[in-house]
Each structure stands twice: as structure tokens, then as C-alpha cells.
Image (cartoon, rainbow, N blue to C red):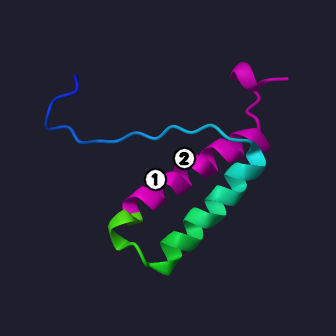
Amino acid sequence: MGMTDDDDSVYCDVQMPLAQSRELLQLVSTLRESKAHPTLDRVFERMQYELSTSIDILDNPPTWGPWRQ
């Protein structure tokens, strides 16, 4: 599916150290719980999911695949 003129999706793929990702996850969670930005709730939810998943993979590396020691 190609990008079209009516596709206004923005992607933000940011790399950061583990400590920063934990801090960002805490910040996003706090922002989401504050309900101060209701229109961003789905964005915060997605960020929480992405960050949690990435942190979990580093904390609990799978016993298969490229993460194996």
C-alpha cells in the first residue's frame, strides 16, 4: 500500500537506552492516567504497548532467535 495524499499518518520510531525507555514509559503512563489529553489516549496506549514489549524483550530475552546469548 503506497503513501497517498490523504494519508496523514505520522510515524515516530525512536531508539533510546533501556533506562530512558523506562522513564518514558512512566511519563506516558502518568500522562495517560491524568486524562489531560483525551484525544491522545490511543497514542499513549500504543506507546505503552511498544515500550513495554521492547523493555520485556530486554529484561526476559527469548530462548530462541537472535537474542540468544
Where residue 5 is drawn, which disc sits there?
none
- Residue sitting at 41 percent across and 57 percent down? 43
Residue situated furthest left in the rendering: 6
**Disc 1 vs disc 2: Cβ atoms closer than 8 Å?**
yes
In this view, the residue in front, 69 or 21, is: 21
In this view, the residue in front, 9 or 60, is: 9
> Which percent across, then down, holds residue 17?
74, 42
The residue pinned by badge 2 equals 50
- Residue sitting at 75 percent across and 39 percent down? 58
- Assess whether residue 54 is covered by the magenta stretch: yes
Q: The N terminus is located in which quarter?
A: top left
- Residue sitting at 69 percent across and 46 percent down? 55
> Which percent across, then down, holds residue 38?
36, 73
Q: Amino acid at mark 2?
A: Glu
> Which percent across, then down, holds residue 39?
32, 67
Q: Is residue 60 visible?
A: no
Q: Give neighbour class at mark 1: few <14, some 14-19, many 20+ (Cα, 10 Å).
A: few
In this view, the residue in front, 9 or 51, is: 9
The residue pinned by badge 1 equals 46
Name the magenta segment's main secondary structure: helix
User: In which quadrant of the rendered view does residue 63 lie?
Assistant: top right
- From the viewer's perspective, is 47 left or right of 60? left
Which residues fall within the magenta stretch?
42-69
In this view, the residue in front, 65 or 12, is: 12
- SS class, disc 1: helix
Label 1 to label 2: alpha-carbon separation: 6 Å
